[in-house]
Image (tube, rainbow, N blue to C red):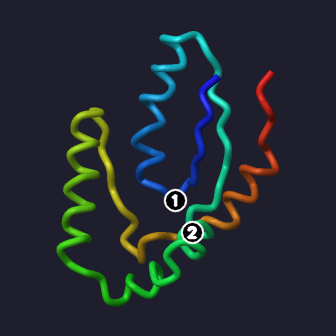
Amino acid sequence: MIEAYFDRSSPRTYLAFEGLLALSTELDVEVDWKPILVGGIFNSVIPSVYAQRADAVRAKARYMLNDLGDWARQARLRIRFPPSIFPVNSVKVMRGCIHRRRPPG
């Protein structure tokens, strides 16, 4: 069993998805997709994360974009960000994921 925690607004979830599916097929195991709210975790661990959106550290933002771009190229995926503010609020869609979640088995 592979346990995978995800948030629909997370670019890292998107980039990991295909690799996890291939790995689960190769190992012949199920993926237990567990929805989490990354924003809630950030708020409790790094309370200033959302305040930093308005006054972002450019070097950090550039590094993140380069890192995600490198990962996307390696995975042969295309990554795009919404034209609006990022990160997006995923509370409602994640509630839907929790509601639809069916434990494996």
Report x, y in % for residue 10: 48, 56
Asked if 87 appears above or below 12 in the picture, the reply is below
Report x, y in % for residue 35: 67, 49
Say which quarter of the image contains residue 41: bottom right
Tag in front: 2 or 1: 2
Quarter that holds the C terminus: top right
Figure label count: 2
Label 2, label 1: how far apart the Cα atoms are? 9 Å
Report x, y in % for residue 4: 58, 38
Going 82% across and 50% down the picture, which residue do you hit?
99
Asked if 60 appears above or below 76 in the picture, the reply is below
User: Judging from the image, what secondary structure is the residue with disc 1 in?
Assistant: loop
Asked if 35 appears above or below 89 in the picture, the reply is above
Task: Say which amino acid is labelled 2.
Answer: Gly
The residue lying furthest to the front in this view is 45
Q: Is residue 1 left or right of residue 19?
A: right
Q: Is there a contact, CB below 8 Å, between mark 2 and mark 1?
A: yes
* Label 2 environment density (alpha carbons within 10 Å; few <14, some 14–19, many ≥20): many
Report x, y in % for residue 43: 57, 76
For this rendering, which residue is in front, 9 or 30? 30
* Label 1 environment density (alpha carbons within 10 Å; few <14, some 14–19, many ≥20): many
Going 40% across and 66% down the picture, which residue do you hit?
82
* Res 49 label: none
Query: First in sequence: mark 2 or mark 1?
Result: 1
Task: Say which amino acid is labelled 1.
Answer: Ser
* Res 39 label: 2
Quarter that holds the N terminus: top right
Q: Is residue 104 left or right of residue 70?
A: right
* Res 9 label: 1
Going 62% across and 34% down the picture, which residue do you hit?
3
